[in-house]
Amino acid sequence: MTDNGNLNDGEIDPTPAAAEETAAETAGNGHEPVLEVPGEVAVPAEDLLEVEEEVEEADSPFDRPGRWFVVHTYAGYENKVKSNLQSRISSMNMEERIYEVTIPLEDVIEFKNGKKVVVQKKVFPGYLLVRCELDDDSWYVVRNTPGVTGFVGHGAKPVPLSRKDVETFLGVKEHGVEVAKKTRPAQAFELSETVRVKEGPFADFTGQIAEVNEDQLKLKVLVNIFGRETPVELEFSQVAKL
């Protein structure tokens, strides 16, 4: 008669001492240690680190699938057009070709009634950014969305954004621009004067002054964006005379 306290051949001793002995053998046989979670498949720690690195790298807007294109819309209807396009993508089963639709925004801190308030503003009104695999079908879905007037490009050919443009326009919201009360600068600005933008998402762009607000120390500068002159509101301190 077999003693119930003994183990049969091929069985594993579940006692803590046996577990320690098994772990010691594993560590000494040249295999990498693994992280074990009850009920899950054990994965080598080195593999987990590689997965985390891959996720971080893929988080860059430029490294995601597809290319980024600029779509022109009626100014003031950007949110409506974005909603219309997202509905068409879903109803026409184009999720695997058109991945993302976004409106570049920036968080601006302003002073109102003596208090700081954060205001979200569109980086350039009248435009959407669309990440997609551009072919005849995806072009048709986007171009025929109500409120869309066309892709930005050379003639009828849409041109994808460069890495620099993607990082500039999609990185704006993370940084923001703090607007504080400033003393009136010594230099004055005049209408039609050409200035260079010193900071913000349009740094190094040049444009003509279309409006001067002496009281708020702000300018409206016509900046050439994607082949169109777009009015951009800037602080006096954000521009320099040429």
Image (spheres, rainbow, N blue to C red):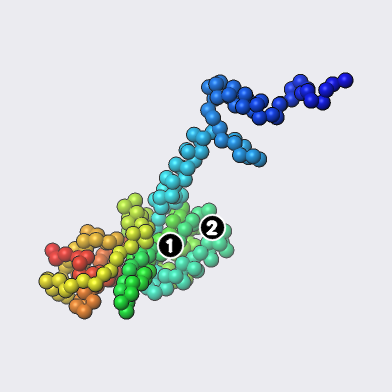
Between circles 1 and 2, the one closer to the viewer is: 1
Residue 191 visible from this viewpoint = yes
List the single residue furthest toward the left: 186
Q: Position of residue 51 (x, y in %)?
A: 49, 40
| Mark 2 lies on residue | 94
Quadrant for residue 203, please give it: bottom left
Image-based side of 189 in relation to 54, left or right? left
Marks 1 and 2, the one that precedes in the sequence: 2
Question: In the depicted view, which residue is nearer to us: 35 or 69?
Answer: 35
Q: Is residue 55 above or below residue 154?
A: above
Q: Is residue 204 above or below residue 222?
A: above
Q: Quadrant of the C terminus?
A: bottom left
The CA distance from mark 1 to mark 2 is 16 Å
| Mark 1 lies on residue | 102
Image-based side of 9 in relation to 134, left or right? right
Question: In the depicted view, which residue is nearer to us: 54 or 37?
Answer: 37
Q: Is residue 56 above or below residue 159?
A: above
Amino acid type, residue under disc 2 in the picture: Met
Image-based side of 22 in relation to 8, left or right? left
Image-based side of 152 in relation to 6, left or right? left
